[in-house]
Image (tube, rainbow, N blue to C red):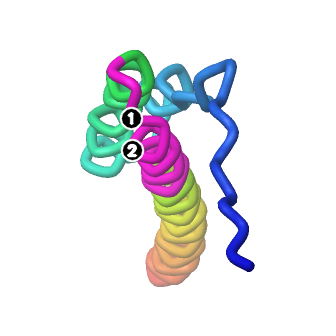
Amino acid sequence: MEQNYQQQPMLTPPKNWLVESILVTLFCCLPFGVVGIVYATQVSSKFNAGDQAGALQASRDAAKWTKIGFFVGLAVLVLYIIAIFAFGVTAFWANKDAMNDYR
């Protein structure tokens, strides 16, 4: 006996991640944020066209690229702060040695 399992239609569209993608594009990482925006804009249009599976996949892709952009931007920021600190310490010690030469 074969049972016919039908997928229940979704009543609300999946999360589109548009606001998060725009914020990641502006503040973190432009390329990954733009990819997130592209997928985020597809969520509503696919859902309204009746493509629930496509809308869900676009939502997952938008979430993935938005999160990748956020964490890449965060990593770059941390590396930038470390580099500024390292160059500052290096300049301090180089300047200190130069000041000792004049005494």
Q: Is residue 76 above or below residue 14?
A: below
Q: Is residue 66 magenta?
A: no
Residue at image position (52%, 44%) is 56
Q: Dots 1 and 2: beta carbons under 8 Å?
A: yes
Residue 82: x %, y % from top left:
59, 69
Give me the C-alpha separation between circle 1 and circle 2.
5 Å
Q: Is residue 1 left or right of residue 91?
A: right
Q: Is residue 78 above or below residue 36?
A: below
Mark 1 highlights which residue? Answer: 51
Give the total of numbered labels.
Answer: 2
Residue at image position (40%, 26%) is 50
Identify the secondary structure beneath mark 1: loop
Outermost front residue: 1
For the C terminus, which image quadrant? bottom right
Name the kind of residue labelled 1 in the image.
Answer: Asp
Mark 2 highlights which residue? Answer: 54
Identify the secondary structure beneath mark 2: helix
Residue 67: x %, y % from top left:
56, 53
Residue at image position (52%, 28%) is 16
* Span colored in magenta: 49-65
